[in-house]
Image (spheres, helix red, strand yellow):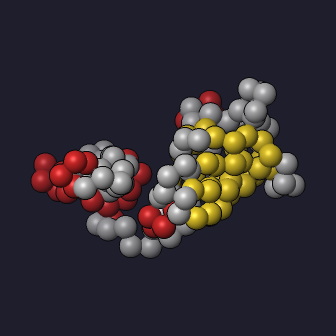
């Protein structure tokens, strides 16, 4: 945050962290502001709000494009409408072949057999108790 906005005060930085936090489904007395979401926090710090942020209305993947050698893992952000229990993310080729199914919000760029996937565009489908969403991202090796 500070490298993007060096003039931020401590109070502004704290407000951006709290504003960008994702709910973990508990009351605020148990979870505080929630789980820190660095992407949303940086967006608030640099733009002042989440207005126009696709992640509030659809599932997103970042970084996009995903470069495994530089980023380590691609992360998925779910909009509030998809934040339910038992979230599963299925990653497909653009031809519809299943590459991998994951139960978390990060993926290391490997298929079900543990082999690195090829460069290209991939489609992901998020399914949770709250509904289903989809998105796309690219992998660059």
- Regarding residue 6, the answer to whether it shows in the image is no
Residue 63 screen position, x and y as percent: 55, 47
Q: Say which of 56 and 23 sits in front.
A: 23
In the rendered picture of this protein, how many numbered marks are placed on residues? 0
* Residue sticking out furthest to the top: 114
Counting from the top left corner in percent of width and height, residue 82 is at 52, 62
Q: Is residue 19 left or right of residue 14?
A: right
Which residue is at a point 84% across and 54% down the rendered structure image? 96
Occupied quadrant, residue 110:
top right
Q: Position of residue 18 (x, y in %)?
A: 24, 54
Residue with the most extreme bottom position: 52
Residue 47 point in image, percent of width and height? 33, 65
Q: Is residue 12 visible?
A: yes
At x 69%, y 48%, the residue is 90
Q: Residue at x 29, y 66 (%)?
A: 48
Residue drawn 68% across and 54% down?
124
In the image, 15 versus 7, the foreground residue is 15
Q: Is residue 36 left or right of residue 11?
A: right
Position above or below: 133 against 61: below
Q: Is residue 42 above or below residue 50?
A: above
Quarter of the image where one finds residue 70: top right
Taking the image as shown, residue 62 lies to the left or right of residue 115, namely left
Q: Quadrant of the C terminus?
A: top right
């Amino acid at each position: 945050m500070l490298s993007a906005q060096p003039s931020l005060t401590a109070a502004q930085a704290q407000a951006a962290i709290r504003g960008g936090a994702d709910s973990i489904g508990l009351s605020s007395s148990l979870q505080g502001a929630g789980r820190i979401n660095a992407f949303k926090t940086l967006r608030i710090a640099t733009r002042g709000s989440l207005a126009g942020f696709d992640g509030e209305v659809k599932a997103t993947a970042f970084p996009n494009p995903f470069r495994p050698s530089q980023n380590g893992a691609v992360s998925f952000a779910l909009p509030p409408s998809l934040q339910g229990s038992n979230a599963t993310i299925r990653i497909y080729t653009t031809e519809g072949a299943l590459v991998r199914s994951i139960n978390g919000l990060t993926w290391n760029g490997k298929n079900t057999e543990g082999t690195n996937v090829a460069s290209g565009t991939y489609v992901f489908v998020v399914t949770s108790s709250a509904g289903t969403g989809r998105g796309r991202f690219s992998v660059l090796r």
